[in-house]
Image: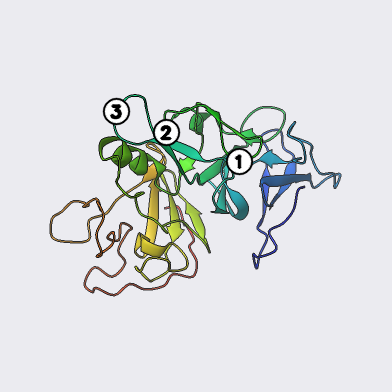
């Protein structure tokens, strides 16, 4: 195991049953999710990457500070607190030759418990190419892959869209990623707690509103309208800042409320 994030007040632990009947303990760490066999006490060696022994989360983010099982018990989700050292490289505008700029990569990591010899990245969440780029980066030995796996927590899909058509557009929803997450997994979505504060730079989910919702089918955030237009208005810059985009627990009021934890109870 590489490390446990020292700045975090917790290191998440989850116990789950692998499809072959083994009971496994999962521990969130800096760039991985460590896995231990409860029968033997041994840590499983699952990654060929140097310095990483568990399920490699380098491409997803840093500090896996929340773990949550899907309702069917077949997928374990890990939510990173911070962005990955491997950036996105978004194209700016439509001119040739292409001009690209970096963007933060922060993806929820799905660990498959339903097949194979050991837990691994779930194959259902491996295919998208969000930034249209594959190759070297400007940080260390890392390379950006063609496929960008996981569920897009920090709105890279929307940032790529805006920057393609409006080359000088700001990144979509800055400061919107989780810094103190709590995660609930349903059959169709990931729900992440908000901070109860819609101001930029706030703790928790910043501008999400009360709760952030990520659709598993599209692997991106659901954008809820926060005005009378009936649809979400993209922010193209300006002093007013981008609007809230999450699920509003207090629609009768302009105020937001803090949520300190989430739990999903299947019907």
What is the crowding at mark 3: few (fewer than 14 residues within 10 Å), some, or many (at least 20)? few
Looking at the rendered structure, the secondary structure element under dot 3 is loop
Q: Position of residue 242 (x, y in %)?
A: 28, 59
Against 100, residue 85 (above or below) is below
Q: Are marks 1 and 2 in contact (CB under 8 Å)?
A: no
Q: Position of residue 21 (x, y in %)?
A: 72, 37
Q: Position of residue 39 (x, y in %)?
A: 83, 45
Looking at the rendered structure, the secondary structure element under dot 2 is loop
**Position of residue 135 in the picture relative to residue 233 (left or right):** right
Looking at the rendered structure, the secondary structure element under dot 1 is loop
Q: Distance of mark 3 from mark 2, alpha carbons?
A: 16 Å
In the drawing, what numbered circle is on residue 131? Answer: 2
The residue located at (44%, 69%) in the rendering is: 259
The residue located at (58%, 39%) in the rendering is: 59
Whether residue 74 is visible to the viewer of this picture, yes or no, is: no
**Position of residue 219 in the picture relative to residue 147 (left or right):** left
């Amino acid at each position: 195991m590489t490390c446990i994030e020292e700045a975090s007040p917790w290191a998440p632990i989850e116990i789950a049953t692998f499809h072959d009947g083994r009971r496994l303990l999962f521990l969130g760490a800096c760039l991985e999710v460590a896995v231990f066999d409860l029968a033997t006490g041994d840590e499983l060696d699952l990654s060929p990457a140097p310095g990483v022994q568990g399920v490699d989360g380098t491409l997803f983010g840093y500090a896996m500070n929340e773990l949550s099982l899907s309702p069917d018990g077949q997928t374990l989700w890990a939510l990173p607190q911070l962005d990955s050292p491997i950036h996105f490289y978004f194209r700016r505008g439509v001119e040739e030759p292409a001009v690209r700029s970096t963007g933060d990569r922060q993806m929820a990591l799905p660990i498959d418990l339903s097949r194979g010899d050991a837990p691994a990245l779930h194959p259902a969440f491996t295919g998208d190419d969000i930034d249209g780029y594959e190759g070297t980066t400007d940080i260390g030995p890392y390379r950006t892959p063609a496929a960008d796996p996981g569920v897009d927590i920090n709105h890279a899909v929307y940032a790529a869209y805006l920057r393609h058509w409006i080359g000088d557009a700001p990144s979509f929803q800055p400061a919107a990623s989780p810094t103190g997450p709590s995660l609930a997994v349903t059959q169709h979505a990931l729900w992440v707690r908000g901070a109860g504060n819609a101001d930029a730079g706030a703790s928790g989910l910043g501008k999400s509103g009360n709760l952030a919702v990520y659709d598993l089918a599209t692997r991106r955030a659901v954008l809820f309208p926060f005005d009378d237009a009936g649809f979400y208005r993209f922010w193209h810059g300006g002093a007013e800042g981008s609007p809230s985009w999450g699920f509003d627990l207090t629609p009768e009021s302009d105020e937001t409320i803090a949520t300190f934890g989430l739990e999903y109870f299947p019907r």
